[in-house]
Image: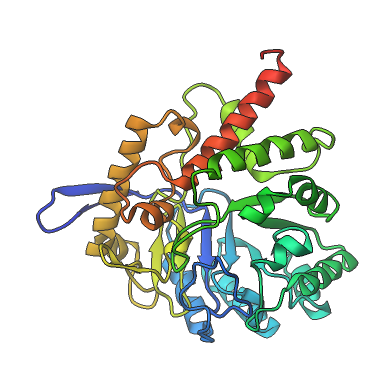
Amino acid sequence: MSVTCGTAATHAPVNVELAPLGLLVVQPTPFCNIDCSYCYLSHRSDKSRMDVATVKAIARFLRGMPLREPQLSVVWHAGEPLTAPTEFYETAFAALQSKAAPTLFTHHFQTNGMLINDDWCELFKRWAVRIGVSIDGPKKIHDAYRVDRSNRGTYDRVMRGVAKLREHEIPFTVIGVLTRDALQAPDEFWHFFETLGATQVAFNVEEAEGTNGSSSLSGNDADQSFRAFLQRVARLRSANPGMRLREFDGMRGHLTAPPGSDVMRADNRPGAIINIDVVGNVTTFSPELLGVEDDRYGKFHWGNVHTDDWQAVVSNPGFQHAYSDILAGIEQCRDTCAYFSVCGGGNPSNKLGELRTFAGAETQYCRLHVQAFADIVIDELEHEIGIG
């Protein structure tokens, strides 16, 4: 599907190619019950909750949109989803499914894990919800950043939630944010995740974006320290190659793909990810843009599911401005970066956070989360075939 629209009043129209929708991110509430020092969310004290009318409007908005897979993944995120009660999700899941038929959904929660109890586990099982837990490693590392609103560490409460998942035999993945503290303890960090019982471990880099204006990984020595950390983790992993690591496994897939199989990023292609906030405002591209307001681009919501459709979103001047610059940034990456084929043009929210524009190329996030992982995996592949 394509839509032609103008990038601004004085710009020629741009053809908006709608990517198949692969991920729907829904904000049931902006509220979060903890206060991580690196959080990028600006409204995490807002206790608003999505109503069922908005859930039904989301279903209407989705009608006719092309899907990447037969089942659409829905991530309930952008705040702590478990601060809304189980009754909300029972109603919301049923309403979404009934109003969006024949589309089928796979529901995901990304949670800090602190509120998981028997009732939540029963809901997870009943609806086959997939669970991701955010935990940053051993207690000392985790509690340095992931604190509650009284500045107390949350590790023990998160681990009680993990224990409850294990008790109910519910598979879970984990995401750990790599901070400067983590880089100083690769062995301790790795062994913690190796024994946690997760089906997959993912590494996020502490980023400067949203309300988090700086990162502990900023500094002249960050790249070298980060690469040393990854090299050590790669060596430790060689003793347990069955341990799934999202970044390493994903990069290996990119590097061993047939020639010409360039990465197509979901977060810089319109429609591949749709993000909807608590009152039904719609954005696309990086989920982290939801709720952000910028001097250059304004607010990153370009329609509302109660009143608009996709055509209205892509016709919005704010979308047109952002998309024009995102395209310019992708082309800059293509022209200047040797890693383009395994990256696909960079993450818009990181470009905005670090460069203050979408029309830019390399960021610290690129150097750490793409280039460093690519180089480590290339070293592994060369070692496996006897080169070097």
Quadrant into which the C terminus falls: top right
Q: Please report the residue visible at 59 percent of the width from the left and 58 percent of the height from the top.
A: 73
Q: Residue at x 42, y 45 (%)?
A: 363
Q: Return the residue nearer the eye: 111 or 128.
A: 111
- Which residue of the protein is positioned furthest toward the front in this rendering? 220
The answer to whether 193 is drawn above or below residue 144 in the figure is above
**Residue 355 shown left or right of residue 236 in the figure:** left
Q: Where residue 2 sits in the image (x, y, percent)? A: 31, 48
Q: Position of residue 104 (x, y in %)?
A: 60, 61
Depicted 49 relative to depicted 126: above or below: below
Count all numbered tags in the image, as a single digit.
0
Residue 283: image quadrant is bottom left
Task: Single out the residue that lies furthest toward the right.
Answer: 167
Q: Is residue 347 visible?
A: yes
In the rendering, at what x and y percent does residue 153 appear?
Answer: 72, 74
Question: Image height check: is 345 above or below 74?
Answer: above
In the picture, measured across the screen, residue 348 lies left or right of residue 125, that is left
For this rendering, which residue is in front, 109 or 103? 109
For residue 178, say whether it is visible. no
Name which quarter of the figure residue 5 lies in: bottom left
Q: Nearer the viewer, residue 280 or 227?
A: 227
Image-quadrant location for residue 237 = top right
Residue 235, x across and y down, in percent = 76, 33
Say which residue appears at 82% left-offset and 63% top-offset.
Answer: 170
Is residue 381 left or right of 12 when viewed as pictured?
right
Q: Residue, x 73% and y 73% (percent of image)?
A: 154
